């Protein structure tokens, strides 16, 4: 499956399992498309390996960590008081500039092989 926003890096464990990490930062207008892409990956994982997500050391085949942050900018009115040599600021609005989502998927060897086949292009 072709992905437009997510590019995964793979870290292999000694047992053939490993983890896939991706991070994408987008403007607010592109957030729904990024979320749709993450949903596509997670829906694949749930459908292909229904024994997850959950801690690998508790017998689950795969697990995930999904986090998000938003960067914003706050506009302010500034007033200077010359005799007092001080400034007074008043917030007048805020705007979200960027959303960043990180997704980590960890799994046993069979999960990792299937994930590479589904979402990672060959480097050859």
Image (cartoon, rainbow, N blue to C red):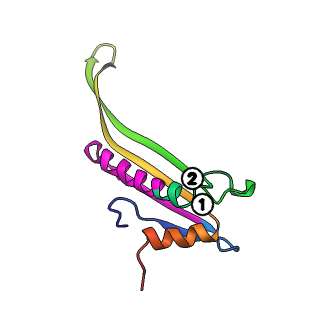
Q: Is residue 29 above or below residue 44?
A: above
Residue displayed at 26% across by 18% down: 79
Q: Quadrant of residue 49?
A: bottom right
Residue 113 in the image, given as x and y percentages of width and height: 55, 73
Residue identifier under label 2: 64
Residue 90 in the image, given as x and y percentages of width and height: 30, 18
- Disc number for residue 33: none
* Front one among 87 and 38: 38
Left or right? Give the position of 30 relative to 118: left
Q: Under tag 1, what secondary structure?
A: strand
Q: Is residue 15 visible?
A: yes
Residue identifier under label 1: 106
Residue displayed at 40% across by 75% down: 121
Residue displayed at 67% across by 56% down: 60
Q: Under tag 2, what secondary structure?
A: strand
Quote the CA–CA distance across marks 1 and 2.
6 Å
Are the residues at dot 1 and dot 2 in contact (C-beta closer than 8 Å)?
yes
Left or right? Give the position of 61 relative to 3: right
**Which range is magenta?**
19-43
Q: Is residue 12 visible?
A: no
Residue 94 in the image, given as x and y percentages of width and height: 30, 29
Q: Main secondary structure of the magenta part?
A: helix
- Residue found at the far bottom of this picture: 124
Q: Earlier in the sequence, mark 1 or mark 2?
A: 2
Asked whether residue 8 is drawn in magenta, I would say: no
- Residue found at the far top of this picture: 83
Residue displayed at 56% across by 50% down: 65
Q: Is residue 3 above or below residue 103?
A: below
* Front one among 118 and 81: 118
């Amino acid at each position: 499956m072709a992905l437009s926003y997510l590019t995964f890096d793979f870290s292999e464990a000694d047992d053939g399992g490993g983890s896939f990490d991706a991070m994408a930062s987008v403007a607010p207008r592109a957030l729904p498309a990024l979320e749709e892409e993450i949903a596509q990956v997670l829906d694949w994982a749930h459908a292909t390996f229904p024994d997850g997500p959950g801690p690998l050391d508790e017998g689950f085949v795969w697990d995930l960590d999904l986090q998000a942050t938003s960067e914003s900018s706050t506009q302010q009115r500034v007033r200077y008081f010359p005799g007092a040599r001080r400034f007074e600021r008043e917030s007048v609005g805020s705007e979200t500039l960027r959303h960043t989502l990180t997704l980590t998927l960890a799994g046993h060897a069979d999960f990792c092989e299937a994930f590479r086949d589904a979402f990672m292009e060959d480097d050859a």
